[in-house]
Image (cartoon, rainbow, N blue to C red):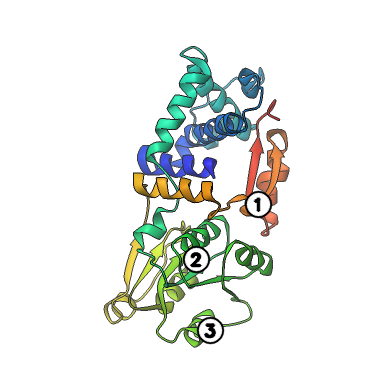
Amino acid sequence: MIHEIAHQWFYGIISNDPYNDAWLDEGFAVFAASLFKFSKLKQAKDYNSMFKPDPNLELPVNLPLNQYESNMSSYVYGKSARKLWELFKDNGELTEAEKFLKSYYHFYKYKQSIKDANVRKGDTVVVYGAGPIGLFAVLGAKIARASNIIVVDLLDSRLNKATEVGATHVLNAKEVNPVEEIRKLFPYGADVVIEAAGVESTFNQDIQSTKVRGTTMVISFHKQVIQFNVPAALLFSGVKLMGSIGYSNETYNEVIESLANGKLSAQSIITSEIDIDNIAEQGFEALIHDKSKAKILVKLSGAH
């Protein structure tokens, strides 16, 4: 959760160019999540051992991704986090690093898309896509006390995970027409539909699943240009099409409170924990080839 909060803050406030700025984005996220974890657990730890230098990493960390012929993940996830720690090592060490994190988390948080979409108690919410982004949207809808949370995906393993985190209905789009099934369950459509799949077919289904004057919220990245009939899809239905990025202090405090009182449990979305040395095979390759994976936590060298 902390790692993802760091990501979203970076994209919303600093840069939305992960190709050129991945070193700072991932470095900051790893740095923040690691310090938060050890501080929260109050473990006796030599913090300097968390970010051990690697003499084989001779290139700068702030290069575009295509300039790393090998060991890209070691630069982006490892060396960049170590460079950040060195700033605090020479300027107040752990005390200043934790003070920085506390100030940082005071302003930025997760779950903003649910708030922007104005999900209210009793609403019907549909989430297209049960990957990590969609699963967090389910958690957000649950906290907002939506009465019905319908999740659509192509994989039963992901739909099972969606049920685990709070979905009241799941639909496998390979087996049924999701729009027709949603309209059978809720003839007027959903109050809010969350687009978390990132493909053209679901984008059009999102709008078709939304009730008149309802809201379709797009929170996924689309790799290709999509087409849809604006007059038919929006003008004649009154559907509000929105996107969401950035976080308010109010939303952040709500998320922290929900984590503290047990209303929100993000642990179930974490499907595995790996060492950074295995990030290529057990991290990137696993995410590409095993679609049942949701969130994979990466432990830095020397971190226990």
The reply to whether residue 248 is in sight is no
Image x and y of residue 231, in percent: 28, 78
Image x and y of residue 53, in percent: 63, 18
Q: Secondary structure at mark 2?
A: loop
Return the residue at label 3: 181
Q: Kindly check if marks 3 and 1 are in contact, taking CB atoms under 8 A apart as contact.
A: no
Per the model, the C-alpha gap separating discs 2 and 1 is: 18 Å
Per the model, the C-alpha gap separating discs 3 and 2 is: 20 Å
Please tell me whether residue 94 is drawn above or below residue 109 in the rendered image.
Answer: above
| Residue at image location 67% in from the left, 69% down from the top | 156
Q: Nearer the viewer, mark 3 or mark 1?
A: 3
Q: Check the picture and name the quadrant holding the C terminus.
A: top right
Identify the mark nearer the N-term, 3 or 2.
Answer: 3
Q: Amino acid at mark 1?
A: Leu
Residue at the far top in the pictured view: 90
Local packing at callout 2 (Cα closer than 10 Å; few below 14, some 14-19, many 20+) is some
In the displayed structure image, the side of residue 243 where residue 195 appears, left or right: right
Q: Nearer the viewer, mark 2 or mark 1?
A: 1
Mark on residue 287?
Answer: 1
Please tell me whether residue 57 is drawn above or below residue 72 in the rendered image.
Answer: above
Quarter holding residue 238: bottom left
Viewer-proximal residue among 174 and 251: 251
Image x and y of residue 229, in percent: 34, 76
The reply to whether residue 77 is in sight is yes
Residue at the far front in the pictured view: 261
